Amino acid sequence: MAATRLSAATLILSSVAVGVLLVGCSASVSVGSTPKMSSEKLATTLAEKLAATTGQPEPDITCPEDLAGKVGTTTRCKLTAGDGSTLGVSVKVTSVDGDQINFDFEADGTASPAPN
C-alpha cells in the first residue's frame, strides 16, 4: 500500500516536472523603487499556475525569500507532495515593467523521496 502511495505521488510530481518544464508568468507588486514579490505571493502564484497547467489541485509550495524585481534574479522554491516527497522549482525574473514582475519557472526533473 505504501508503494502505491509513493507511486501516485511520484506520478503527480513527475507530471509537474514534465508538464511544466518552463512556464512564464507575472505578478504585480509595488514596494519602493525596486518592486518585490513576497515569498507567500510567489508561492501562491506558482501553485495556481502549476494547478492550471497540470489540471491537478494546487500543490503545497514554499519559497524561502521574496523575489526582487530585477532581471536575472533567481530563487528556488519547494513543492511538497502529500507523502512528503519534494520537487524543486527554479524561478527567474525575465523582465520588469513598472511594478509588474515577469518570471519563468522550471520544475526539477526528479523528485526527492520523503524522509523516512
Image (cartoon, rainbow, N blue to C red):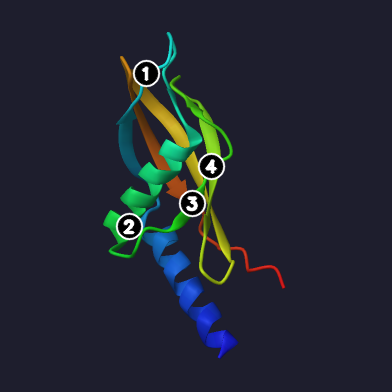
- Tell whether label 1 touches label 2 (CB within 8 Å): no
Q: Is residue 17 above or below residue 103?
A: below
Q: Distance between the residues labelled 2 and 4?
A: 17 Å
Q: Which residue is situated farthest in the right direction here? A: 116
Of circles 2 and 1, the one toward us is 1
Q: Indicate the amino acid at tag 1.
A: Ser
Q: Which residue is drawn at 57% across and 60% down?
A: 86
Q: Residue 30 carries which label?
A: 1
Lower position in the chain sequence, tag 2 or tag 1? 1
**Residue on which the image places disc 4:** 63
Q: Locate the C terminus and report the quarter of the image it occupies.
A: bottom right
**Which element is circle 2 on?**
helix
**Residue on which the image places disc 3:** 61
Lower position in the chain sequence, tag 1 or tag 3? 1
Q: Locate the N terminus and report the quarter of the image it occupies.
A: bottom right
Q: Which residue is drawn at 55% across and 78% down?
A: 6
Q: Which mark is residue 2?
A: none
Q: Indicate the amino acid at tag 3.
A: Ile
Instruction: Tell me if mark 2 has few (under 14), some (14-19) or many (20+) residues whose alpha carbon lies within 10 angstroms of its own.
Output: some
**Residue on which the image places disc 2:** 51
